[in-house]
Amino acid sequence: MTDLSPSDLAKFAAARRSVDFVEDGMKLGLGTGSTAAWMVRCVAAKARAENLRLTCVPTSERTAVQAKALGLNVVSLDEAGWLDLTIDGADEFDPQMRLIKGGGGAHLREMIVAAASDQMVVITDPGKQVAQLGAFALPIEVVPFGIDSTMTHIRKVLESADVAGREIALRSSEDGPFYTDEGNCIIDAALGQIGAPEALTQALNAIPGVVENGLFIGLCDRVVIGHGDGKTETLSADEDAIETGQVDPNEAASLPG
């Protein structure tokens, strides 16, 4: 029997189901985060077991380190070109499969990689499914230069935005401000609810100094939800039916890494 917690089992179940979409010869985007870390291990196990030829593009330095250690063929996005599939996690998703991402601070690369893919599969647990986005703080990536001015512009945009809250804060780490792999800072916006995600993302990205925000709109094709008992549900953007499945929890013990 597995000794995984229900939370880890849910992450493993979603990750394990998602690699069923991986095929030989694919150019594959590898996401970042705790659920994506399970996915990378599942991809490596499948590649070994089936002798798959995969070209993998990581969305962060930590994912790159993990994928290389597991023997996956890791290249840059420029080297890979257009991708067949990206598998990544999310902090929230709504019924329209709009996402909030960036809790791990990698949403800029994650968005670039997802936008350069034919398909995006999101792996998550039931707690990330919401009726309306906004309970999770929205990450806004900004350049360090003139950050006070940029924050002032963000506050002005939020004053007229369809949101329930407007508190913003500079993300910090143990050593000071948090910096992304690109050397940028992140402003976290506690919005409560976002009534018009499309309008908000356009307004935020129009601010000088804002690089990107964590709203992913029109990029997700499928969501795989893992449960603590190994059950999975797969939602598709172009289908109403929910595909259900069951993952064997004991498979987790045989994963590399």
Image (cartoon, helix red, strand yellow):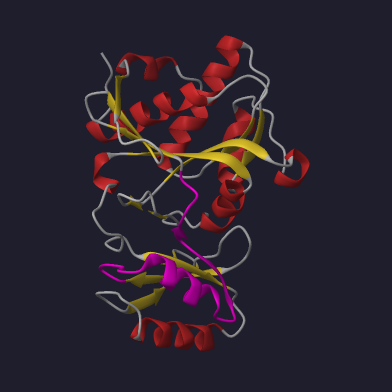
Picture coordinates of residue 70, whole percent (x, y): 59, 26
Q: Is residue 127 above or below residue 240?
A: below
Q: Is residue 116 above or below residue 207?
A: above
In the displayed structure, would residue 238 be above or below residue 165?
above
Residue 246: percent from left, percent from top: 29, 19
Q: Is residue 40 left or right of residue 164?
A: right
Q: Is residue 16 visible?
A: yes
Quadrant in which residue 117 is drawn? top right
Residue in the picture at 50% in, 49% down: 219
Magenta residue check for 206: yes
Residue under the image location 48 percent in, 75 percent down: 204
Residue in the foreground of this view, choosing between 32 and 224? 224
Residue drawn at point x = 40 percent, y = 48 percent = 90
Q: Position of residue 184 (x, y in %)?
A: 59, 68
Residue situated in front as seen by the camera: 142 or 212: 212
Residue drawn at the location 72% of the way across and 43% of the way down: 76
Magenta segment includes 110:
no
Q: Quadrant of residue 171?
A: bottom left
Residue 220 % position (x, y)? 46, 45
Q: Is residue 257 visible?
A: no
The N terminus lies in which quarter of the figure? top left
Write the start and end of the magenta stretch as one range.
191-220
User: In screen coordinates, is 116 left or right of 86?
Assistant: right
Q: Is residue 130 left or right of residue 152?
A: left
